[in-house]
Image: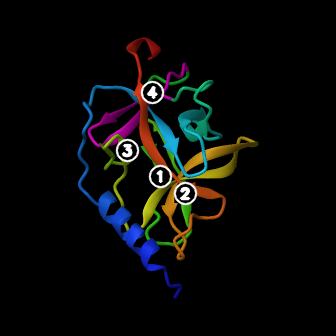
Amino acid sequence: MVSLSVYKLTTLIIAALAGARPASNDKPSDEYFSLALIAEGYPQLSLNAIQSAVLGSYDLIFERPSVYPGTPAILNGTKLDFHIKDPNQSIDYCATYFEEVGDSYGTTVPATAIFGNDEGRTGFGFTDGRLYARMDAAFEHFFACNETLNGKEQFGLKWGVFEANGSSPAGCVAAELVQNFNVLESEL
């Protein structure tokens, strides 16, 4: 078993307990917003949905906010929906989805936005302007990871578990998602 320093272990336990609270909202449910990345060693980047290789699914990636201001999002109860206009779909909302990862150290899975709301994960909310997601096991967290999407190198959003030594999984950095700005109805 790999031992953690007292500092890292305490930090991970506090993070796990903070994410284990029931889903509550400190934002009105009818207010649109975008999300931005806060991660050590990185500038603030906006979260954007881009068409994935799977029909009806969008990859969530981080990009320069000066060019890509962020895909409008809204909390629908405790689901995180992205407002995406797609002429090929009759639905404008894509629900955030990612698989459960349990407590498998160093594992990450893609966070995606899928058309319709039935398949989206529940348990999202805001605390002090920071987005949290329901955790199914201790030490789960958002990560920003280097990956290849549609043949192009991207910096994508993933959900996963820290390594046993408390570090981020390979190619990833621990990420916090914060409210970036309010989106005007005219942008929808």
Residue neighbourhood size for the residue with mark 2, other residues' Cα within 10 Å, grouped as few (<14), some (14–19), many (≥20): some
C-alpha span from label 4 to label 3: 16 Å
Q: Which residue type carries mark 1? A: Phe
The residue tagged 4 is: 72
Q: Nearer the viewer, residue 160 or 5?
A: 5
Q: Which residue type carries mark 2? A: Val
Label located before the other in sequence (4 or 2): 4
Q: Which residue type carries mark 4? A: Pro
C-alpha span from label 4 to label 2: 23 Å
C-alpha span from label 2 to label 3: 21 Å
Residue 80 against residue 121 in the figure, above or below:
above
Q: Nearer the viewer, mark 2 or mark 3?
A: 3
The numbered mark at residue 98 is 1
Extent of the magenta region: 71-87
Q: Secondary structure at mark 4?
A: loop
At 36% across and 26% down in the image, what residue appears?
A: 32
Label located before the other in sequence (4 or 3): 4
Residue 81 located within the stretch drawn in magenta: yes
**Residue at far right of view:** 151
Q: Nearer the viewer, mark 4 or mark 2?
A: 4
Q: Secondary structure at mark 3?
A: strand
**Which x, y percent locates residue 65?**
58, 29
Residue 7 located within the stretch drawn in magenta: no
Q: Which residue type carries mark 3? A: Arg
Q: Are marks 4 and 2 in contact (CB under 8 Å)?
A: no
The numbered mark at residue 109 is 2
Residue neighbourhood size for the residue with mark 1, other residues' Cα within 10 Å, grouped as few (<14), some (14–19), many (≥20): some
The residue tagged 3 is: 130
C-alpha span from label 2 to label 1: 7 Å
At 55% across and 60% down in the image, what residue appears?
A: 108
Q: Are marks 2 and 3 in contact (CB under 8 Å)?
A: no
Q: Nearer the viewer, mark 4 or mark 3?
A: 3
